[in-house]
Image (tube, helix red, strand yellow):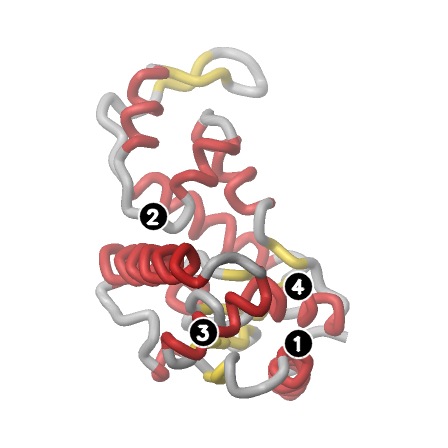
């Protein structure tokens, strides 16, 4: 069925476009299910996994280290490494992405999917971006919250996601060379952005 990865800067429409693309293509949308699966494999709560999702933080590893060991579903105890490092979370996330791509496919928002699945011929990698002020205006209209609050949130979000990709994959997540399609999500209505992505996906044989 294939897989579509969507990388989106704050305010560019990622949370709205990605599930709409999945629905149009008849594919599952993978978002919260990914940290849930990672959490289960690391023996931590989903809240802990989501709090660390796409962030270069070490709190998760302090928590995992404090657990010492986690139950094995088939019995016994599987000891964890004495000093888990941040690579474990990334590696489990990458494993889940490959399993999704090898299975029923779907649409994935974030998780550096374009870098993890860069070599797959059955993938479409999409980047949604736009000028910061335009993204801020779009966020104000979309979420109805104070501009100052959203500006701080946008700046923190953009820095965090860029840091994640630069830290683990040594590249700029905004660079066009990583994607098949780059769209200014602030320059077009979101329905039109969805149309562009769906058309590109179908041209690569992805979806129904």
Closer mark to the observer between disc 2 and disc 3 = 3
Give the CA separation, mark 1 to mark 2: 30 Å
Closer mark to the observer between disc 4 and disc 1 = 4
Residue 180 vertical placement versus 52 (above, below): below
In the image, 151 versus 98, the foreground residue is 151
Instruction: State which quadrant residue 20 falls in.
Output: bottom right
Q: Reading the chain from its start, which is encountered first: label 2 or label 3?
A: 2
Report helix, strand or loop for mark 3.
helix
Which residue does the image show at 62% across and 66% down from the upper left? 16
Q: Give x and y (percent) for residue 53.
A: 42, 45
Q: Which residue is mark 4?
A: 19
In the image, 191 versus 95, the foreground residue is 191
Q: Give x and y (percent) for residue 43.
A: 46, 25
Q: Reading the chain from its start, which is encountered first: label 4 or label 3?
A: 4
Residue 75 vertical placement versus 104 (above, below): above
Q: Which residue is mark 3?
A: 135
Asked if disc 1 and disc 2 are in contact, CB closer than 8 Å, the reply is no
Q: Give x and y (percent) for residue 176.
A: 36, 83
Q: Reading the chain from its start, which is encountered first: label 4 or label 1?
A: 4
Give the CA separation, mark 4 to mark 3: 19 Å
Closer mark to the observer between disc 1 and disc 2 = 2
Give the CA separation, mark 1 to mark 3: 29 Å
Instruction: State which quadrant residue 23 falls in.
Output: bottom right
Q: Give x and y (percent) for residue 82.
A: 24, 21
Q: Around disc 1, counting alpha carbons within 10 Å, would you say few (fewer than 14), some (14 to 19), or many (20 or more)?
A: many
Q: Around disc 4, counting alpha carbons within 10 Å, would you say few (fewer than 14), some (14 to 19), or many (20 or more)?
A: many
Q: Which residue is mark 2?
A: 55
In the image, 152 versus 59, the foreground residue is 152
């Amino acid at each position: 069925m294939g897989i579509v990865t969507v990388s989106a800067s704050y305010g560019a429409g990622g949370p709205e476009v990605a599930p709409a693309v999945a629905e149009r293509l008849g594919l599952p949308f993978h978002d919260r299910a990914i940290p849930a699966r990672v959490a289960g494999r690391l023996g931590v709560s989903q809240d802990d996994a989501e709090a660390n999702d796409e962030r270069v933080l070490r709190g998760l590893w302090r928590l995992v280290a404090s657990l010492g060991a986690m139950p094995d579903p088939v019995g016994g105890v599987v000891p964890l490494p004495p000093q888990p490092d941040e690579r474990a979370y990334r590696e489990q996330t990458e494993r889940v992405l490959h399993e999704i791509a090898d299975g029923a496919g779907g649409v994935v928002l974030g998780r550096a999917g374009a870098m993890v699945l860069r070599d797959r011929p059955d993938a479409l990698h999409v980047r949604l971006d736009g000028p910061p002020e335009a993204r801020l205006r779009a966020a104000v209209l979309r979420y109805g919250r104070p501009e100052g609050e959203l500006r701080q949130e946008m700046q923190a979000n953009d820095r965090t996601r860029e840091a994640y990709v630069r830290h683990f994959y040594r590249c700029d997540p905004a660079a066009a060379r990583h994607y098949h399609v780059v769209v200014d999500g602030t320059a077009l209505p979101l329905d039109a952005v969805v149309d562009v992505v769906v058309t590109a996906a179908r041209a690569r044989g992805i979806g129904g």
